Amino acid sequence: MDLNLTGRHALVCGASEGIGRAAAHELALLGADVTVLARREESLREVAGNLPRTDHQHHGWIAADVADTDKLRAQVEALVAGKPVHILVNNTGGPPGGAVCNADIPAFLDAFNKHLVANHTLLQAVLPGMRTDGWGRVVNVISTSVREPIANLGVSNTTRGAVASWAKTLSRELAGDGITVNNVLPGFTETGRIAQILSDRAKATGQSEQQIADGMRKTVPAGRFAQPGEVAAAIAFLCSPAAAYINGVSLAVDGGRMQSI
């Protein structure tokens, strides 16, 4: 199986922690040069400095706020001017929870800007280089909610679904250029996002976070939450040469929790 990414350049968003950080690590293990992107410069320096590397690999970082799409585009265009990006991993923390009927308009606009608009901005910045080289991988880290909406994550459910539809459309448009576009749908994963969900649900119900976590685990046939590296392994595979004919899919990494096929 060809998993070799030597000579490829990956841009991994949300890479200061959690799934993004784990994905950067896995891609570096496969030989890619990795640029990590997030808001916190100090964390990014540490992440980039600790990525696996050979004498031929060069890793870097970009401190950027995905909500500032004009600046984001300029930063990534400056990056690709020096070295084309062949792999784009779109990964951004989800919006706050709550019932969709209670969400105000700014909450939707903020979420769409940080997810769909930012993803599209990044895609347009890296696409010319992918097309020139006739090779590209785009992987969007979204959520199982694109198939089964999750209670009390109304704005997130709406936004993630839009990203999934955008990705499916792109996958059909770009396949002829040697570019695949896929989504990874993490289930409950040991990240800062799950900590936020536990805290929100504890405040809303009066239960302890431990009680809520135990209840969530009971809904997972595997009986546990995923580790970030388990989701990252799926991302890395979809970015590999071996996955060249996998295009336009949404791959759940959820321990079997979803009821749908």
Image (tube, grey):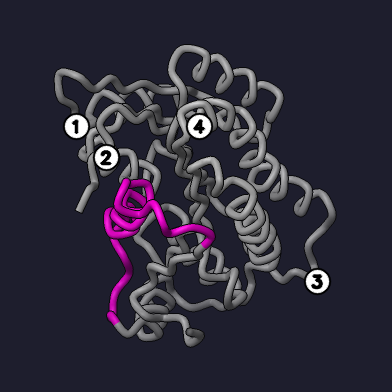
Give how far apart the Cα atoms at labels 3 and 2 are. 39 Å
Q: Quadrant of the N terminus?
A: bottom left
Residue 101, labelled with which disc? 3
Farthest left residue? 55
Residue 30 placement, left or right of 240: left
Residue 164 placement, left or right of 190: right
Identify the residue under disc 4.
130
Q: Earlier in the sequence, mark 3 or mark 1?
A: 1
From this view, report whether residue 189 is shown above or below residue 172.
below
Q: Earlier in the sequence, mark 1 or mark 2?
A: 2
Q: Earlier in the sequence, mark 3 or mark 2?
A: 2
Residue 126: horizontal and vertical position, in percent? 55, 29
Identify the residue under disc 2.
25
Residue type, numbered disc 4: Met
Give how far apart the Cα atoms at labels 1 and 2 are. 7 Å
Depth check: 2 or 230 in front?
2
Question: 10 Å neighbourhood of mark 2: few (<14), some, or many (≥20)?
Answer: many
Image point (27%, 54%), residue name: 229
Depth check: 174 or 52 in front?
174
Q: Earlier in the sequence, mark 1 or mark 4?
A: 1
Give how far apart the Cα atoms at labels 4 and 3 are. 41 Å
Identify the residue under disc 1.
52
Residue 108: horizontal and vertical position, in percent? 77, 54
Which SS class for mark 4? Answer: helix
Looking at the rendering, the stretch of residues picked out in magenta corresponds to: 222-248
